[in-house]
Structure formats: C-alpha cells, structure tokens
Image (cartoon, grey):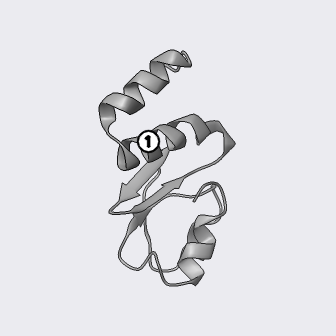
C-alpha cells in the first residue's frame, strides 16, 4: 500500500503490531501500526510506502519480495534508478 492507502490496512486491522509507513499526516489512521519514517517498509508480506516520490523504491521492494533482490537490482539498473 502506498501514500494514504496504508490507512485502509490499518482500519481493516491488518497493521496490528506491523512496521509500516504512509503519507505524512496519516500516521494516526494506520491503526495498530508501528510507524517508521522510511521511504518503504516491509514487514512480512506487508509492504508500505510514503507517496508518489517513493513509487520506484516501492516497486523494487515488491519485486524483491516476489522474486529476489538481484532481479530488483537489475530492474533498477535498467531504468537508471540510483538507490
């Protein structure tokens, strides 16, 4: 979930005791989450990100989760993304 979308996960109870991040100002709506001020946070199978400016890092974290870090690095290099 990216931007304000983690608030939906919070309302559904999915973020209980999970590390997460969201768009600034929405932290209180991520009910039960342990909020971190990072671009992308993964806790188990939950991946959250702060906003449009973190979308590439978010996508690469999803690739890492679904495939592996080497594939994510390869994709990042191919799109000229500097982490």
For residue 42, which quarter of the picture? bottom left
Tell me which residue sits at (53%, 41%) in the image: 59
Position above or below: 70 against 59: above
Residue 45: percent from the left, percent from the top?
38, 63
Residue 38: percent from the left, percent from the top?
45, 46
For residue 2, which quarter of the picture? bottom right
Position above or below: 68 against 79: below
Position above or below: 50 against 82: below
Q: 68 or 49: which is nearer to us? A: 68
Residue on which disc 1 sits: 63
Residue 26: percent from the left, percent from the top?
64, 65
Question: What is the residue that sits farthest to the front in this orientation?
Answer: 67
Question: In the displayed structure, does residue 82 sit left or right of residue 7?
Answer: left
For residue 61, which quarter of the picture? top left
Q: 21 or 81: which is nearer to us? A: 81
Position above or below: 3 against 10: above
Residue 76: percent from the left, percent from the top?
48, 24
Question: In the displayed structure, does residue 35 sit left or right of residue 9?
Answer: left
Q: Is residue 83 visible?
A: no
Tell me which residue sits at (39%, 49%) in the image: 66
Q: Is residue 45 visible?
A: yes
For label 1, the SS is helix
Give the position of the C terminus as an image quadrant.
top left
Tell me which residue sits at (47%, 25%) in the image: 75
Give the position of the N terminus as an image quadrant.
bottom right
**Residues packed near mark 1 inside 10 Å, few (<14), some (14 to 19) or many (20 plus):** some
Number of labels in the image equals 1
Tell me which residue sits at (45%, 61%) in the image: 20
């Amino acid at each position: 979930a990216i931007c304000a979308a983690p608030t939906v996960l919070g309302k559904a109870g999915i973020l209980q005791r999970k590390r997460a991040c969201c768009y600034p100002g929405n932290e209180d709506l991520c009910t039960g989450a342990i909020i971190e001020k990072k671009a992308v946070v993964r806790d188990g199978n939950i991946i959250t990100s702060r906003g449009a400016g973190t979308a590439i890092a978010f996508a690469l974290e999803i690739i890492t989760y679904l495939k592996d870090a080497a594939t994510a690095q390869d994709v990042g290099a191919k799109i000229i993304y500097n982490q």
